Amino acid sequence: MDIEEEEEITDDRLQIFHNTVREHIIFLLLLMLLYTASYALIARFRRRDKEDLFSTDDDEILVYRISLWLCTFSLAIAVGAALLLPISIASNEVLLLYPNSYYVKWLNSSLIQGLWNHVFLFSNLSLFVFLPFAYLFTESCGFPGHRKGIIARVYETFTVFSLLAVVVLGLTYILSALIDPERSGILKLVLSLGSAHLPFLYSCVSFIGVLLLLVCTPFGFIRLFGVVGQVLVKPHLLRDVNEEFAAFNLEEASVKRKLANVIANIELQNVSTSDANGIHSGIINPTLKSLYQRKPINGNVGNEPAQLLERLRELESEKRELNKLKTSSSFQRNFVYPFAMLLLLFLTVITIFLVVVNTLELLIGIKALPLSTRQFTLGITSLSKLGPTGAALEVFIISYLGATSSVGLYTMPFMRIVRPQKHKTSLAQLILNCAIVLMLSSALPLLSRILGITNFDLLGDFGAIEWLGNFQIVLFYNLIFGTTTALCLVNKFTATVRRELCARLVENYFIFINYISFIN
């Protein structure tokens, strides 16, 4: 081998080494950024009282911090999983627009492939190791008879976690053997534990996440309209805000006066009935008594102060909303609010249209199933027929799906118990919320690929999930998602009209009945 060939081999090794070091530095920087953002988010919701953090016990402080770190890391991985597909699509279009740019040479297929592999690996670790360990660690107190301390709690946590892992793996083995009898056998279980059964377990969890997205995403489409309506100020067409504000002030003053009279009347009655001698009970001037004696609401004197206070709170809330409407700028009312509503409606309609097109292509046989294990090279062709504009629209729709699924999830009735509240959420609730968010964010790339939002193939082990190759599952998922979303959208914009029509029909029915009875 001559000197030139040796130098070329050395240069190739150096280039591979430099690329590997650069990729790991980028991964570390992304992890630090996501971890910082996740910690700030958790700090906003976590509870800081003595129930969660015992300032007098060093072991409890250490346990709390370790569990909080694991919870924050899992949330960072969840955010990274949600950003996988948008980052990959945007990277492909950037390389197409600037193929020879010096500043984007670090953005290559190896980097994106490694990002998908790292997210898949840490998603499994967070879902099956870190979060269960964090919860068991916080609930542990050490085995009886052992010396109390952090080591005893670690032993108990590892023991309980090992038993739980055996149970979960046993259930996974039974389920996989029922689906595929060829996998049965203890020897095959040991040999294919990392290559078959653990990926099968994650595929089951991802399938549950996709089903959960099927429930909460269409509901989130409609709920997001209400959230935007609460945040932004609506335009006050055909309304005199100053007149309404004056009317609210008058009613508020009237309610306060009534409340003061009722309270004074109750106090006078208490003074009159508590007279020990029983004389001069009628010392109150009759005209004054008639002034304080007011007609009770619904015939119950005791409920009148509570009803007046409730009405006063309602008036104050309505006044705040009216004051917000009064002080808002005309640009925000007449441009920002209609633009936001039209943007939400446009993204929802586009999503339904893409789902319908994808369903028809699956039925005809034009489009292949989302199961894919082929190697994808970044920067060769555009993923959209519309070029960078279509790719940008895909990124917006995928981000919109993530936002709607989050809004829909936390507005579902069964999430009221675990819904995080500002500075009132315990560590156990944070761990549960991180597990749910991680499950949904890991299923978001699968959802986008199943619905045909993008043509970007799922990389790494994400594209090797077996149920993605089932035609019936993919087809029925598209049908149910498209139908449910369309019905929710139609119900949202026709609910007021339908209620008015029903009210008019009922009114006309009673008028007709009264007319018939009058004739008879």
Image: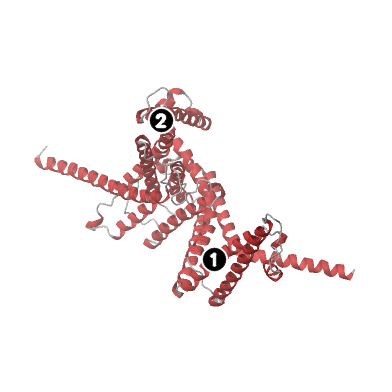
The quarter of the displayed image where residue 313 is located = bottom right
Residue 490 in view, yes or no: no
Q: Could you tell whether 21 is left or right of 69 in the image?
A: left
> How many marks overall?
2
Could you tell me residue 322's position as x and y percent?
52, 70
Q: Nearer the viewer, residue 56 or 505?
A: 56
Q: Tell me: residue 473, above or below residue 507.
A: above
Secondary structure type for disc 2: helix
Q: Say what amino acid the circle numbered 2 marks.
A: Thr
Could you tell me residue 328's position as x and y percent?
46, 72
Residue at 43%, 25% in the rendered image: 188
Q: Say what amino acid the circle numbered 1 marks.
A: Glu
The numbered mark, 1 or 2, whose residue comes first in the sequence reads 2
Q: Which residue is mark 1?
A: 316
Q: Tell me: residue 182, above or below residue 304.
A: above
Q: Tell me: residue 449, above or below residue 308.
A: above
Q: Nearer the viewer, residue 400 or 33?
A: 33
Q: Tell me: residue 386, above or below residue 448.
A: below
Q: Quadrant of the C terminus?
A: bottom right
Could you tell me residue 277's position as x and y percent?
69, 55
Residue at 27%, 59% in the rendered image: 98
Say how the picture is coloured. secondary structure
10 Å crowding of disc 1: few (<14), some (14-19), many (20+)? some
